[in-house]
Image: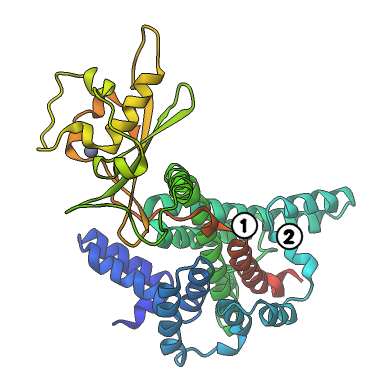
């Protein structure tokens, strides 16, 4: 284990070197260590994981962060963030408020609110205050958007990383265009390289940007997984109505699976569902004979031994074809989303089997043709969690900038 893995920036560069050398596992190991072992970062990750309901990761990060904590000289300053990490918002607020001179200035860094506040400043002929609010609010928007982009590229670590990267870039640009009047985040080190506080403030800014980026990533994730989340919620509603247990699947027989597919006809906006053969009886969704979708394509050959009609996709596509009328029958505008109920009741996305893939040219798309992932419940994105770490991030960033702004 290298000490360098604990240093923001350095560990990311190290990861890139790993990646460039084709060592994907080494890159991931370095990043995991950064987020699960680095004091403050690990504690913040723990807090984020906790509010997101990922208790295993929270415990791992919390303990990892604590084990490295002794080597950190500025522990005292992080008290507020630590309170947040364990869910103690009241004491966290107290500590943070003591460190933050006015709550009014905090509004500056909230997008839209900050922008609106800037307009009021300008209206009152307070150009400096307006500039400050405008720069601060736009900065948060930039960091959040970068986090969303980072998530698309590399998941949660990418979200945090690009958030940090955008914050650093933004601060450097701000310092340049304001002729050195606004010196924020990491630029404080450039301005006062011998002042210890510069490093601490820059570090707090980096942590805040990482969290803000992470929050942006969560928004992107919610957006990207919208079809799967919607399909899983619909399935849960159906299962609840039928009285199926939430913590187990209803698959029967050897290798039995419980698979549910939704086919959305993008032309009409209507959605049709199907389940796989082994659970059709218990779902009360008997197999259509013949399957009209398969009948449209008699020349497509399927490689697997089982009949293509046994899949949930074929069942759903049959219903799409049945619903259509007129001369232009086509499933070319249909989007498939397939999920599976695992034996413990968890709902995972599911790529198409080889039989279903044989029909890919006559179907629009399938959102779940990717590595299977556990589909989050929509309430895992509740604003409560977002607000908690959003506030922590904002306060951390604000704290970092306070000395130079006030
Ligand atoms: Zn299939």
Q: Within 10 angstroms of label 2, few (less than 14), some, or many (20 or more) residues?
A: many
The image position of residue 293, as x and y in percent, is 27, 22
Residue nearer the viewer, 2 or 264: 264
Assign a secondary structure to mark 1: helix
Q: Quick check: is the Cβ at mark 2 less than 8 Å away from ligand 1?
A: no
Q: Which mark is residue 64?
A: none
The image position of residue 395, as x and y in percent, is 66, 70
Q: Is residue 288 left or right of residue 51?
A: left
Q: In the rendered picture of this protein, how many numbered marks are placed on residues?
A: 2
Q: Which mark is residue 140?
A: 1
State ligand 1's quadrant. top left
- For the N terminus, which image quadrant? bottom left
- Disc 2 designates what residue? 108
- For the C terminus, which image quadrant? bottom right
Q: Within 10 angstroms of label 1, few (less than 14), some, or many (20 or more) residues?
A: many
Residue at the spot 71% in from the left edge and 75% down from the top edge: 403
Does 53 sit above or below residue 300?
Answer: below
Measure the C-alpha gap from mark 2 to mark 1: 9 Å
């Amino acid at each position: 284990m290298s000490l360098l893995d604990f240093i923001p920036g350095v560990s990311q560069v190290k990861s890139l070197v790993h990646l460039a050398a084709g060592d994907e596992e080494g890159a991931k190991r370095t990043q995991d260590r950064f987020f699960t072992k680095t004091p403050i970062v690990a504690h913040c990750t723990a807090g984020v994981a906790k509010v997101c309901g990922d208790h295993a990761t929270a415990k791992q990060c919390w303990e990892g962060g604590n084990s490295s904590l002794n080597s950190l000289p500025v522990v005292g300053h992080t008290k507020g963030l630590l309170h947040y990490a364990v869910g103690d918002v009241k004491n966290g607020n107290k500590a943070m408020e003591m460190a933050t001179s006015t709550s009014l200035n905090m509004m500056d860094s909230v997008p839209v609110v900050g922008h609106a506040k800037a307009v009021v400043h300008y209206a009152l002929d307070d150009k400096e205050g307006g500039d400050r609010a405008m720069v601060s609010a736009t900065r948060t928007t930039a960091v959040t958007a970068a986090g969303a982009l980072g998530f698309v590229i590399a998941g949660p670590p990418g979200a945090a990383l690009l958030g940090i990267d955008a914050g650093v870039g933004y601060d450097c640009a701000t310092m340049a265009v304001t002729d050195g009047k606004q010196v924020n985040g990491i630029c404080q080190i450039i301005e006062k390289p011998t002042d210890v506080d510069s490093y601490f403030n820059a570090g707090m800014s980096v942590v805040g940007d990482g969290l803000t980026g992470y929050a942006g990533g969560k928004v992107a994730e919610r957006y990207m997984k919208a079809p799967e989340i919607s399909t899983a919620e619909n399935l849960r509603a159906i299962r609840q109505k039928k009285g199926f247990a939430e913590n187990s699947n209803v698959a029967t027989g050897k290798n039995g699976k419980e698979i549910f597919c939704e086919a959305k006809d993008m032309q009409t906006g209507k959605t049709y569902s199907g389940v796989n053969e082994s659970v059709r009886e218990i779902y009360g969704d008997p197999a259509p004979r013949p399957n009209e979708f398969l009948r449209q394509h008699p020349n497509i050959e399927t490689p697997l031994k089982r009949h293509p009609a046994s899949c949930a996709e074929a069942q759903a596509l049959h219903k799409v074809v049945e619903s259509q009328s007129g001369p232009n029958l086509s499933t070319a505008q249909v989007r498939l989303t397939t999920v599976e109920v695992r034996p413990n009741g968890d709902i995972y996305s599911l790529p198409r089997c080889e039989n279903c893939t044989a029909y890919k040219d006559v179907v629009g798309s399938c959102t779940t043709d990717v590595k299977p992932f556990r589909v989050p419940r929509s309430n895992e994105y509740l604003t409560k969690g977002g607000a908690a770490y959003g506030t922590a991030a904002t306060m951390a960033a604000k704290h970092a900038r306070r000395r130079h702004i006030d």
